Amino acid sequence: MNHTPRTRTVVSCALLVTVLGAGVTACGSDGNPLSAQPYDAADLISFNGPADAGKRADPDKPLEVTVDDEGRITDVTAQDATGRYVTGELTADGSRWHSTSPLAANAHYTVTVSTEDDDGEPGRKVYSFDTSKPSGKKRLNVTFGPDAGQYGVGQPITAQLDQEVKDKAQRAIVERALKVQSTPAVPGSWYWVSAKELHYRPKEYWPTHATVQVHSNLDGVRISDRLWGGRSKPLKITTGERIEAVTDASAHQLTFFENGKVINQVPVTTGKAGYETRNGVKVVLEKQYFVRMRGVTVGIAEGSSDSYDLPVYYATRVTWSGEYVHAAPWSVGSQGYANVSHGCTGMSTGNAEWFFDHIHEGDIVRVVNSNGDPMEPFGNGFGDWNVDWKKWLTGSALTNTAPDGPTPQDALRLRPTAV
């Protein structure tokens, strides 16, 4: 069968996408459908990409591929130079394919169209073009956290946006472009803490000795009429052993677990009446060898019976409002017997030094059987693990309506240096 090229009208530019349709089928001379070499299908296909090699496509316009009545489209793949695919839909009869997500601006794309004629012979056509720059548009930049390095298995991933994104559809575009990959792989999801901040965590804690890589595909992607995605720096972290420190406030004892095995148990004191330590899971934020803790910073009048101004050593911070696990040599007589602190977990200097040396940023610190309030999910550190998985999924713009949670700046800065 001869395929004589015929003129096709080329329409305006468009979007890029990937749609996997049925596999190409044809019969070669040996009867093997895969042995036939695809012919140039340009005479069958109409494509609304840019006709001139030097012309750039408008990423706001959808891409469309159609085929005449002598054949059908079997497969269309479209991706940019960075490997990003764009989704699309192919009609059941194979006559038309169109994109369903936008192209990135200022990007180079390759579109491969596979066809099949009435005799079952395979055809193929490859198109390449560039998209225009988003001139006069704002860029949405993303900063991932924490810094690269090794962390405990409780460490969430954060994505800080430099502009607010409130519209649910726009949030879905942003979230879809923020990629988190772990080895070994585990299920996880983003949660919109606020219009400018997202947290990502797995269903359970991260596996031990995992590698977590985070990157954004937002660069050049249209989010709204005036907002386009900007570039972001990728992030790579690893995890160590599974470390969990569990404080039983009623038993006045801290138990230190490594990979589920008890490594140490030490007597402690926690918050007294009116200053009860928060219940729930916290994540180690930082470690400080020395901290000066003063009652006036939490509203305790100087000279009152509750006033204090103390040098504190081996301080492991678990909330931004000032809850620590630290050395408290002044309360050794109460440790293991009574709760006398202003909200922190206190222990002897020797035990605090041991704890300080064995705990890491991102490790889990959990308090049980306290009369205190539950740990805040957001805004006062990482209370993310206190949100059950079903509710966590409702914080994703891809699975449900994303609730507007408090921002870290909105959190009450209570007890910044409690002892």
Image (cartoon, rainbow, N blue to C red):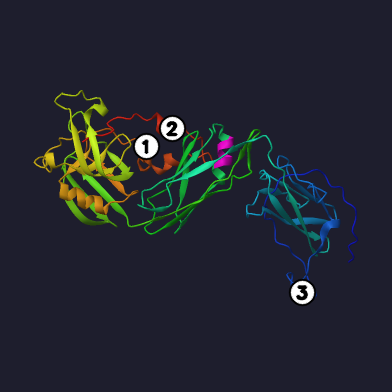
Magenta highlight range: 169-174
Read off the residue under disc 3: 31
Q: CA distance from mark 3 to mark 1?
A: 63 Å
Q: Position of residue 190 (x, y in %)?
A: 48, 43
**Label 3: few (<14), some or many (≥20) within 10 Å?**
few
**Viewed as shown, does residue 370 lie left or right of 397?**
left
Residue 6, picture quadrant: bottom right
Main SS of the magenta segment?
helix
Q: CA distance from mark 2 to mark 1?
A: 9 Å
Residue 337, picture quadrant: top left
Read off the residue under disc 1: 377
Mark positioned earlier in the residue sequence (2 or 1)? 1
Residue at (17%, 50%) from the top-left corner? 351
Residue with the most extreme left position? 333
Q: Secondary structure at mark 3?
A: loop
Q: Position of residue 101 (x, y in %)?
A: 66, 44
Residue with the most extreme bottom position? 30
Q: Secondary structure at mark 1?
A: loop
